[in-house]
Image (cartoon, rainbow, N blue to C red):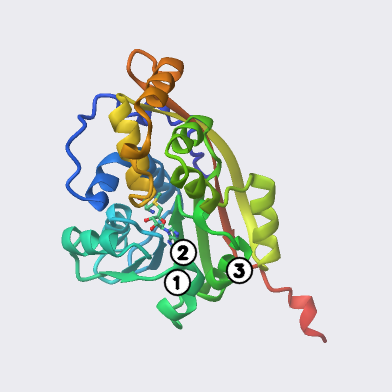
Amino acid sequence: MRRDLPRSLDEDADASAPVVAVSSVAQAYRRESLWQKGRGERLIAFAGVRRGELVLDLGCGTGGLTQQLAELVGPDGHVLGIDPDEARIALARHTALAPNLEFKVGTAETLGEVAPGRPFDLVFSNFVFHWIRDKQAVLRLMRGLLRPAGRILVQCVSSLPALVAELSRLADPSGEQILRDFAFEDAAALARHVEGAGLQLLRLEEQHGTHVYPTLDALMTWWQATTHDRFDPRAVEPAALSRFVERHGDGGAFRVRETFCWFEARLPPTHAWGRGG
Ligand SMILES: C[S@@+](CC[C@H](N)C(=O)[O-])C[C@H]1O[C@@H](n2cnc3c(N)ncnc32)[C@H](O)[C@@H]1O
């Protein structure tokens, strides 16, 4: 039996990480997103990546996981990382250097143009699908890029953490707009999209985790970076922020409880009896 992802990733919480001044939003994202990375590493371990494979990392961000995938496929393999955020791709190109590693600016919705005609062994995507509105259409594009024996592995957040929603809404009106841009869907909806895209769902799990931000600054810096600088902490009234701290601060720390899903899918097996004779 294949190894399960952990039920709770609480142990990933990097409660002692220092809060460093933000020099750029992409760098801040890399620094503040260690828990997404930790969960992505578990997904990579589950993926059983082999030497020589061709891998697509959709929504690769600053490229940390993409680089790990490149190490696993080795010099005979190749990894393509795609992300619409030019600053994140620039940082990825700058820091993740390997001959078998390539980064492109592009979106999930335009996958066919960004990665034309490439038959991938693995299409991997960590914490990106909650930004994608038409998941079924993107899954169809992924399906078109798979080798017959290829697999798709996706992990995403399935509902908005209440604490984050409350924080975001304090930055009126931009904080509310940011929340509308997410497209959270639960496990049942994801299963329908996978099957609707003509893929076979091999496995789907919903999980819960808590990430502890050691300070309010750490929480706000992460949310600002993850929303690509659209959440502006300066837009929050100090009095409203004090009330938020009184309600949710736990000895100065903030606990974000989230629900997320991961699934594995592949092309359906062809039915020999469907060929006649
Ligand atoms: C939470 S980050 C995850 C980054 C990386 N996969 C990781 O685990 O570290 C989500 C990424 O999805 C990208 N993204 C958002 N919308 C996207 C879309 N429509 N197509 C592809 N990527 C998208 C963002 O630019 C961002 O870098």
Residue pushed farthest bottom?
277
Horizontal side of 271 relative to 262 (left or right) equals: right
Horizontal side of 24 relative to 148 (left or right) equals: left
Q: In this rendering, which labeled residue sits more in front, label 3 or label 2?
A: 3
Instruction: Give percent across and percent down for residue 174.
Output: 44, 47
Q: Nearer the viewer, residue 248 or 144?
A: 248
The amino acid at mark 3 is Ala
Q: Between disc 3 and disc 2, whose residue precedes?
A: 2
Query: Which quadrant: the N terminus?
Result: top right
Q: Which mark is residue 123?
A: 2
Query: Which quadrant: the C terminus?
Result: bottom right
The amino acid at mark 2 is Val
Can residue 115 be seen at all in this image of the molecule? no
Residue pointed to by mark 1: 120
Residue at 25% from the left image edge and 45% from the top image edge: 28
How many neighbours does mark 3 have within 10 angstroms: few (below 14), some (14-19), or many (20 or more)? some
Q: Which mark is residue 137?
A: 3
Instruction: Give percent across and percent down for residue 120.
Output: 45, 72
Horizontal side of 180 relative to 246 (left or right) equals: right
Marks 3/2: CA–CA distance: 15 Å
Number of numbered discs: 3
Instruction: Give percent across and percent down for residue 7.
Output: 51, 31
